[in-house]
Image (tube, helix red, strand yellow):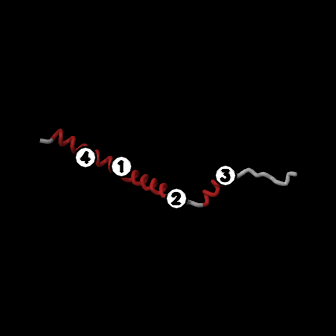
Amino acid sequence: MYDKVYTYPDPDKKEKEKKGKVNFGFKDILAMTIAAYQIIFVPFAIIALTMVALFLLFKLLFGS
């Protein structure tokens, strides 16, 4: 009578399959590239803009 045993699908099956292989999509690579660009270049951009602002300020205050 009970010859067919119903087994519930393993909820962690997809997670287990994902851990085996690492595949980055184009969007992931793009996002990582943008993140790296921001980490490297944003501080330099802030410093450069600050220097320009200070230069203009001193030119305004002490310029002839």
Q: Amino acid at mark 3?
A: Asp
How far is disc 1 from disc 3 in space, using C-alphas? 42 Å
Q: Quadrant of residue 62?
A: top left
| Nearest the eye: 58 or 18 | 18
How far is disc 2 from disc 3 in space, using C-alphas? 21 Å
Tell me what residue is drawn at x 22 percent, y 45 percent: 55
User: Label 3 near label 4: C-beta < 8 Å?
Assistant: no
Is label 1 in a helix, a strand or a loop? helix
| Nearest the eye: 29 or 53 | 29
Circle 4 Cα neighbour tier, 10 Å, few/some/many (<14 / 14–19 / ≥20)? few
Image position, residue 15 (x, y; %): 63, 54
Image position, residue 26 (x, y; %): 48, 58
Q: Amino acid at mark 4?
A: Val
How far is disc 4 from disc 2 in space, using C-alphas? 40 Å
Q: Earlier in the sequence, mark 4 or mark 2?
A: 2
Closest to the camera, between mark 4 and mark 3, is: 3
Is 64 displayed left or right of 21 in the figure? left
Is label 4 in a helix, a strand or a loop? helix
How far is disc 4 from disc 1 in space, using C-alphas? 14 Å
Q: Which residue is mark 1?
A: 43
User: Label 3 near label 1: C-beta < 8 Å?
Assistant: no
